[in-house]
Amino acid sequence: MEYHLQTPLKKEDIEKLNARDIVYISGEILTARDEAHARILEMEEKGEKLPFSLKGAVIYHCGPLMQQTESGWKVVSAGPTTSGRMSKMTPPLLKAHEVRAIIGKGGMKNVSEAMEDKCVYLAYTGGCAALAAELIKEVKNVHWLDLGMPEAVWVLRVEKFGPLIVGIDSKGKDIFAEVREKAEEILEGLQK
């Protein structure tokens, strides 16, 4: 199935998605990598308010390359980064905030249980940084530039961002785990 979703996402939006479905996102998405995840969790621990909302949010694992112009920021390149680096920080993030979708590449380990009834993982093809930049229509804001350009949280307005493949759905189905299991079975068979 193919779905076109508008942010902020509601729980009903993600409940209908199944692993392997195709999704396009329009609206606001926020970039966040390792340092941003760490700061979000640190602020949560201290009871501090974030400068942006994660209610119904879509987080994009991306370290964009931006250019500052007279009229604001322009996206030069915005391909997905490897999501596995954020795997350990994702369960506490989802426990504290109503993030509804995560976009990245390569899948994530040990997060499907934390995502159940809360969130989906949407895989975006690596090597599509220029295409992604074209789908970003506006840089609405930037937070935490002190972390550096790729680690800052960029608030982006996108139109039909995708195609994205549901890699982990909100029912616990994880196509990346299935591939890993099959690969392990094949390796075991070859070693016999």
Image (cartoon, rainbow, N blue to C red):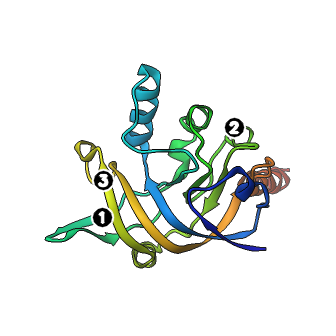
Q: Which residue is mark 1?
A: 65
Question: Quick one: which residue is furthest to the left in this view?
Answer: 70
Which of the 4 image quadrants contains residue 109? Answer: top right
Residue depicted at x 70% and y 59%: 167
Residue depicted at x 62% and y 50%: 100
Q: CA distance from mark 2 to mark 3?
A: 28 Å
* Residue 81 drawn at (x, y percent): 46, 57
Residue type, label 1: Leu
The N terminus sits in image quarter: bottom right
Sooner in the amino-acid sequence: mark 3 or mark 1: 1
* Residue 126 drawn at (x, y percent): 51, 68
At mark 1, the secondary structure is strand
Sooner in the amino-acid sequence: mark 2 or mark 3: 2
Answer above or below: position of 35 versus 107. above
174 to the left or right of 40: right
Report the mark closest to the observer, 2 or 3: 3
* Residue 14 drawn at (x, y percent): 72, 56
Between 63 and 170, the one nearer to me in the picture: 170
Label 3: few (<14), some or many (≥20) within 10 Å? some
